[in-house]
Amino acid sequence: MWKLVIAYLSVVWYAIFFIVGLLGWREARKRYFLRRNTPISHNATPMTDIEGVSIIRPLKGLDPNMYENLETTFTQIYPKFEIIFSVAEEDDPCLDVVQMLIDKYPQVDVKLSIGEEIVGVNPKINNMMTAFRIAKYDILWVIDSNVQVVPETLMRSVKSLTSKPGIGVVHHVPYALVSERDAAVGTQLEQAFLNTNHAKMYIALNALAIDSCVMGKSNLYRRSHIEQISSSRVPLSKQNLLPPPRGPVRGLPAVAKYAAEDAKIGQAIWHELGLSHILDVDVAANALGPMSFKAYVERRARWIRVRKADVLAATILEPLTESVLAGILFSNALSYLSGGRISAIAVFAIHWCIVLSIDLDVRYCLASTPFSSWHECFTFILAWAGRELLAFPIWLYAIFGNEINWRGVKYRMLRNGEVERSSSWSRVGSPRSSQVAGSGHSSRTATEDQAPLLRPGHSL
């Protein structure tokens, strides 16, 4: 009897798995396949009424294709924006890249926020605190240093954010870019994952819109909204609105205790402010550098552990959403229910070919271009198969650990997605900011309780 129950449950689960995958595929074709044939529609909004945007790019060290990645911010087709590069250390080598771009595009309004303000354990939030404070405009576009975008991205994103009331976040699906010189084993596995299964499920979950599902590669939201969130997921109308210490910490410091600050910001905007999200038609092209097999495993394990600390039940069920385990359960269930007349091996082979075909088309929709050669296609399929086969072993390795490695620093995951540094950590609230350099701004002296020094000019 129990075998029959398991068989029927396996079939039902597979139907859910397959329908969600089909939804992601359908949305990918509808949303991204037609993107290259859809020009920007210019409405009649007067130039004086167009909202400005502060683009914040947190930087640390040198990323692959960093010059090209950052340059795409300077070339946005939008009438009113500023760029703020936030860097924790004043001797960071990324500043040389930034300086070259500032020299190349002197007409672009650029600020450099050098230093950090320690408000929690999350280094990205600490790095962005000053940039968040000095931003000229309410609309913020936070975009990672290893991401590049097409020139129309900002125009389309602002249009989506302001198209109707009730929109809190506009975000973009990550898409991996890999050059031939960086095509290590781990890099190819990561590319196959991001450009197929991850993208398909990310698109599907955002189409279902049951809950917030946001990654922080490229996000637009309003500072006035961020300043209200407390990361409690309780509607704002039911919160204690008193200021700290009698009320909760709000704004970016409220999410500084989490490893996945991007997901927490999205959840807070969704649940606390009641604002929805839009997954826009552009992609966040993520330039991947050389990644070893071990580095790939550790990277996947890190995010499994982050999810486990935040949503344990969903993480435990995660292997059932992978094509290998779902296919094994379904094929054996059909074989059992048919009394052995249907071959489980044949069913699994058909299942895997269908999933592969769907995933390859998702990759094509995001890339807007086919593979450049049969060799590239064959290599990608091998990486895809390797990624699918490795998903469950990596999950097993990750599910029994709590430690993660985050840009060379070890952290320990806690409950509710919170994180603590394994070694000693600076006192929360201690300023380490040194300066903010900008273009065309008056200078002032900062006291210990004020923002860092603001200096005119481009020099670093």
Image (cartoon, rainbow, N blue to C red):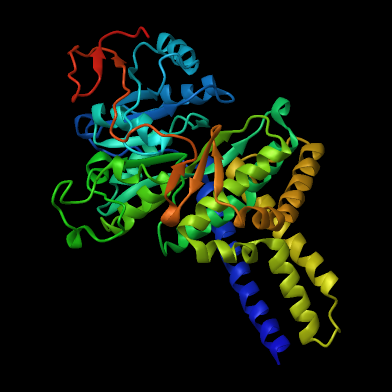
Question: Which residue is at a point 53% across and 47% down the rendered structure image?
Answer: 32
Q: Quadrant of the N terminus?
A: bottom right
Q: Nearer the viewer, residue 190 or 195?
A: 190
Q: Is residue 9 left or right of residue 107?
A: right
Residue extending furthest bottom?
Answer: 1
Q: Nearer the viewer, residue 362 or 38?
A: 362
Q: Nearer the viewer, residue 440 or 304?
A: 304
- Any part of residue 136 in sight: no
Question: Which residue is at a point 66% across and 32% down the rendered structure image?
Answer: 178
Residue 327 in which image quadrant: bottom right
Question: Which residue is at a point 51% across and 22% down the rendered structure image?
Answer: 61
Q: Position of residue 458 (x, y in %)?
A: 34, 9
Q: Quadrant of the C terminus?
A: top left
- Any part of residue 69 in sight: yes
Residue extending furthest left?
Answer: 242
Q: Position of residue 353 (x, y in %)?
A: 77, 60
Q: Is residue 58 left or right of residue 388?
A: left
Q: Nearer the viewer, residue 13 or 306?
A: 306
